[in-house]
Image (cartoon, rainbow, N blue to C red):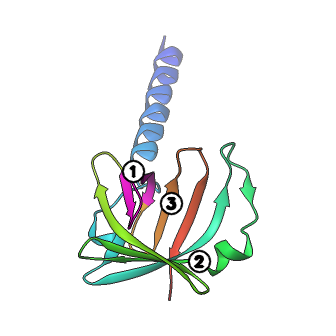
Amino acid sequence: MDKLKNSWHSLLALLLAITITSCGGNKEEVGSESMIAGTSSKTWVADKERNAAGDKEKLTDAEQDQTMQFYADGRFALGAGSSLQTGTWTYDQAGKRLSLQFEGADMTENFEVMKLDDDEMDLRASDGTVMEMELQD
């Protein structure tokens, strides 16, 4: 009987340890709107890309050269080489949704924000691809 009781206590202790570990330190945190643009602006660059299956994809030269600057007033500028696209952005923290409305376009691009902190932002597009971005130094 004591052996069964000790086994039961060991099992409960193990389950408690697993629960505490799984609940703490979530690396997939989704932060606040200010983490996207800072107090005036932040510039983000692509670091890695994963396809819908989760496999790492090689960034194209254009993706590596592209920067995305978010301004605290809700504007953004997406640039690569001599090309520049601008528009407005909104962020729904509760819904983990970043929306980009390109200037002169009737459609809005929506992304699921999978991770957002002061220097990393992971965005999932509607096709399932994920762009891992980092703050440009």
Q: Earlier in the sequence, mark 2 or mark 3?
A: 2
Residue 66 is labelled as 2
Q: Which residue is depicted at the point 53% across and 18% down? A: 3
Q: Which contiguous range is marked in magenta?
A: 97-115
Say above or below: 5 vs 93.
Answer: above
Q: Which residue is depicted at the point 64% across and 81% down? A: 65
Tell which of 32 and 102 is nearer to you: 102
Query: Residue 115, percent across and down?
Result: 45, 58
Residue 20 magenta: no
Say above or below: 65 vs 33.
Answer: below
Viewer-side label of 2, 3: 2
Please tell me whether mark 2 sits on a helix, a strand or a loop. loop
Q: Earlier in the sequence, mark 1 or mark 3?
A: 1
Residue extending farthest top: 1
Q: Amino acid at mark 3?
A: Asp
Tell which of 12 and 108 is nearer to you: 108
* 47 left or right of 104 in image: right
Please tell me whether mark 3 sits on a helix, a strand or a loop. strand
Specify the quadrant of the image occupied by residue 87.
bottom left
Residue 122 is labelled as 3
Find the distance from the CA under tag 1 to the CA under tag 3.
20 Å
Residue 24 is labelled as 1
